[in-house]
């Protein structure tokens, strides 16, 4: 870390913006206390942010109060608006997000993205749709966020053949979007984005550390330590594959049996052509069916997922585990056996790590995550000009 | 973090002491640059540390050099000496350590510690032996460190029934040692201690983040992030049990099949009464035996351990994985298949996470870790008086 005064001001501005996004209504005095800054520093930065149209003072009903009371502040709802895209194997989701964390519009396009060409087409199509939806609101989005499975390089904006997506070799999504729409575009790992959204707008606002585990098409997690996304030494963390599942690790030949493959078996097992994993269809089927074999199989799977969540929790030692992904839409059918095992296998006497459900509609959670990343980057860049 | 000037000075003193333990020979100017402190701050703290007998200036051969050159500094070899104890299920190890990371004496007592009473007796016995060995050197140790499997509470110095050690309920090892020997005693998780020793005196000196995985009696890991032991939100991290191993997770009845149990099977399989896992005996047996079934079984096990190491690495995303524990004494027999799988399953295109062998004799590595913890605590406390 540099100690040059201008860098210090950038860091402090960034801290203030982030804190106000997480906790609107804080006053200058409260910000100074929370961030361990002097009141002069906070006031100077806040005045700049007000003049830039980023922060506003909230009008209070002061009738009855005596003297001057602290003025609550917030990031203006119109300080920025961004489009977020969740680019996954089987669908592409899009949201329009403002600094209050409000999703103004959303869409999901269920078309395969297995081929890079198709994925690029769907990416541009969903951005295009979100742009026109935004313009119907009279909004011109400031930036675009893309969330995608890793390996990715966030800085150069490129995806490198994620598991199950061999065709996405050197997939330069940021360049493609920027050249088409002339808007600054940011790439983030999908699960990291999801965790970022929980941290700023969801169930991670009060948490200093948590793991956000996604049981969805793929499987992965975002890790927050010291209030920030933890990206590891080489730009990734929270990747898990090759965990044994229901006793199998190694598949035929040399190929390892990944959890992703097991999850896709779920739908095959039901013999239905489900749109999405954990859909209401599956829930209804399991609740009403007399197929005891299917019910037993699913309970085994949930128990295994609980074991895997406990392994991750015991390794990372977070304050809480947030469970996300379309699997949680199955409700208690999934959560009950999952929770039982999670607490049974949790390390330590006191089982202090809480289990929390993700805050967002799970079919657009990656898009919200990507939007959160773009929003933070855009607002902070605008703040330090 | 508080910003009171006296707290700032404590933090800076602690940083300087730690940096000098890791890198002896740094000058005041280099310390200032590395730690991003002013030269005045560094000089003032160094002068205090010299007057306390903690730091010394190293004499250089200045013949031929022109003018005043920076004076290298180090923590004095006699600034402190500590006893470290590794308290494990089947043995108790002890070392005498100085601030150069030099092990002056060591011992291993192979007696079962399954019963709390026996463990307490062995703990006191090994400390007693190390004390008299120290006194033969004319040294009176300043502090005692104990490393033990978790769950533990480092602050109150108590162990709470680790896996496989149900009798260690509320085992107040710190109180027992302190009351007997009237020396300040520090408790640390055994694997955390091992990682700390690698960070300060071993192969983690240059690493900002690493995971130190122990394949020994038990199995666990210590995690270093931002150069410091990462302890998680509730005092633990790096715990792993309940990982499936060779296709088995759940044992008979409700009991989960842990990796620890599989490791203990190794010795049973050989039908020998081995002192220690990964001993030279096992190595010789496997190298010379015609027992192809045993060889195959062991290779399967090493491959599984490589998979588990890759899972941990992919989750944490460290710069390097250090492999420790008596398993590594098997040499290439173990390391070759282990390494192959580790790199095969490593996340990312470039497989940047290095694999490094632990630096210490593995039968005393937990004792060295416990000693490192006591040494750091003692020297820093002495420095800020």
Image (tube, coloured by chain):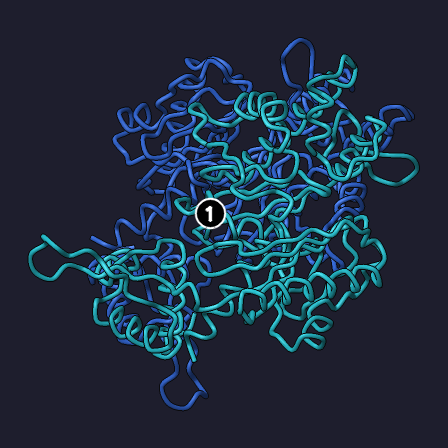
Chain colours: A cyan, B blue
Identify the residue at image location x=60%, y=52%: B318
Could you say where residue B293 lies in the image, as x and y percent from the top left?
Answer: 89, 23
Quarter-of-image position of residue A45? bottom left
Q: Of helix, strand and loop, which one carries label 1?
A: strand
Q: Foreground: B363 or A63?
A: A63
Residue on which the image places disc 1: B229
Q: Is residue A54 above or below residue B173?
A: below
Image quadrant holding the C terminus of chain A, namely bottom left
Q: Is residue A126 above or below residue A251?
A: below
Could you say where residue B158 lies in the image, as x and y percent from the top left?
Answer: 37, 26
Crowding near pointer 1: few (<14 within 10 Å), some, many (20+)? some
Identify the residue at image location x=38%, y=74%: A53
Q: Foreground: A354 or B275?
A: A354
Furthest-bottom residue in this view = B66
Subunit ID for the residue under disc 1: B
Q: Foreground: B233 or B338?
A: B233
Could you say where residue A39 lies in the image, as x and y percent from the top left?
Answer: 21, 67
Quarter-of-image position of residue B173? top left
Could you say where residue B135 lies in the image, as x and y percent from the top left?
Answer: 34, 37
Q: Is residue A371 visible?
A: yes
Identify the residue at image location x=73%, y=55%: B348
Query: On the rendered structure, is B369 left or right of A52?
Result: right
**In this figure, what is the number of numbered marks?**
1
């Amino acid at each position: 870390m540099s100690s040059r005064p201008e860098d210090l001001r950038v860091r402090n501005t960034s801290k203030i913006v982030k804190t106000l996004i997480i906790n609107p209504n804080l006053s200058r005095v409260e910000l100074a206390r929370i961030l361990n800054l002097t009141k002069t520093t906070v006031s100077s930065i806040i005045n700049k942010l007000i003049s830039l149209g980023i922060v506003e003072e909230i009008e209070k009903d002061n009738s009855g109060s005596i003297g001057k009371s602290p003025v609550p502040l917030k990031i203006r709802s119109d300080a920025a608006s961004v489009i977020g895209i969740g680019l996954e194997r089987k669908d592409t989701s899009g949201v329009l997000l403002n600094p209050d964390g409000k999703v103004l519009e959303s869409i999901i396009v269920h078309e395969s993205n297995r081929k890079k060409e198709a994925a690029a087409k769907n990416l541009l199509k969903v951005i295009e749709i979100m742009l026109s939806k935004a313009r119907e609101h009279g909004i011109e989005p400031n930036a675009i966020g893309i969330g995608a499975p890793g390996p990715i390089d966030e800085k150069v904006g490129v995806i490198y053949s994620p598991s199950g997506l061999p065709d996405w070799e050197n997939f330069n999504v940021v360049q493609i979007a920027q050249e088409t729409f002339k808007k600054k575009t940011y790439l983030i790992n999908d699960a990291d984005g999801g965790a970022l959204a929980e941290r700023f707008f969801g169930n991670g606002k009060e948490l200093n550390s948590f793991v956000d585990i996604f049981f969805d098409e793929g499987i992965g997690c975002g890790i927050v330590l010291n209030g920030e996304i933890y990206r590891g030494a080489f730009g990734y963390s929270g990747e898990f594959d090759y965990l044994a599942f229901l006793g199998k690790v190694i598949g035929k030949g040399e190929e390892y049996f990944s959890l992703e493959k097991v999850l896709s078996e779920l739908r095959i097992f039901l013999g239905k052509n489900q749109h999405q994993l954990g859909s209401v269809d599956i829930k209804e089927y399991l609740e009403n069916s007399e197929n005891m074999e299917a019910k037993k199989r699913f309970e085994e799977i949930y128990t295994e997922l609980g074991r895997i969540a406990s392994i991750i929790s015991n390794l990372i030692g977070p304050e809480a585990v947030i469970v996300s992904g379309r699997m949680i839409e199955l409700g208690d059918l999934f959560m009950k056996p999952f929770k039982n095992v999670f607490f049974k296998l949790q390390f330590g006497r006191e089982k202090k790590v809480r289990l929390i459900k993700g805050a967002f509609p799970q079919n657009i959670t990656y898009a919200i995550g990507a939007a959160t990343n773009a929003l933070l980057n855009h607002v902070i860049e605008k703040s330090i000009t």
